[in-house]
Image: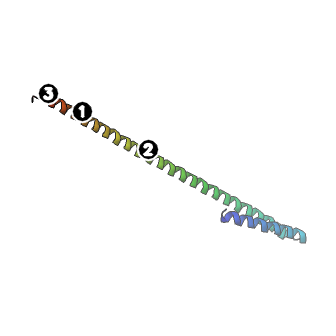
Amino acid sequence: MNKDQISGKVDQITGKVKQKTGEAVGNERMANQGVADQVKGAAKETWGNVKDAAHEAAERHRREHEQQANDTRDKFTNTVQNIKENVNERIDERRIEEKKESERIRERRPA
């Protein structure tokens, strides 16, 4: 709850008290002022609701963006890790092939 919502509720309560007091004592001006205060309070509260909703939407958007950024970083990191593993596997395979080739060459040489 923000200050506009609270202030709006206070104005509405104050306005209701003024209205009822004005009606009770026969003071039309006070009763009308009470109604005006209630309208003003309702407008403030509504404005507070709008601000609250906008803040919540912005926060939700920020969290979604943050999650998307985290997901993208994770995907990128996994891709790099996979590339590294594939390259290392090929290097190991090539080393094994070279070792086998060296052994074949040694076996063909006359002693």
Q: Amino acid at mark 3?
A: Arg
Which of 107/38 is in front?
Answer: 107
Label pair 2/1, CB-CB below 8 angstroms: no
Q: Amino acid at mark 1?
A: Glu
> Where does the image place residue 53, in percent across and percent down from the top left?
64, 55
* Residue at (83, 70) in percent of width and height: 30
Q: Quadrant of residue 6?
A: bottom right
Which of 102/80 is in front?
Answer: 102
Point out which mark residue 97 bears. Answer: 1
Marks 3 and 1, Cα distance to the nearest angstrom?
17 Å
Q: Secondary structure at mark 1?
A: helix
Answer with mark 3 or mark 1, whichever residue precedes in sequence: 1
Q: Amino acid at mark 2?
A: Lys
- Badge 3 density bin: few <14, some 14–19, many ≥20, Cα 10 Å: few
| Label tally | 3
Residue 46 in the image: above or below residue 91 = below
- Quarter of the image where the C terminus is located: top left
What residue is disc 2 on? Answer: 75
Residue 59 in the image: above or below residue 21 = above
> Where does the image place residue 35, in percent across and percent down from the top left?
80, 64
- Badge 1 density bin: few <14, some 14–19, many ≥20, Cα 10 Å: few
Point out which mark residue 108 bears. Answer: 3
Answer with mark 2 or mark 3, whichever residue precedes in sequence: 2
Q: Secondary structure at mark 3?
A: helix
- Left or right of residue 27: residue 69: left
Instruction: Specify the farthest residue to the front.
Output: 111
Marks 2 and 1, Cα distance to the nearest angstrom?
33 Å
> Where does the image place residue 48, in percent across and percent down from the top left?
67, 60
- Quarter of the image where the N terminus is located: bottom right
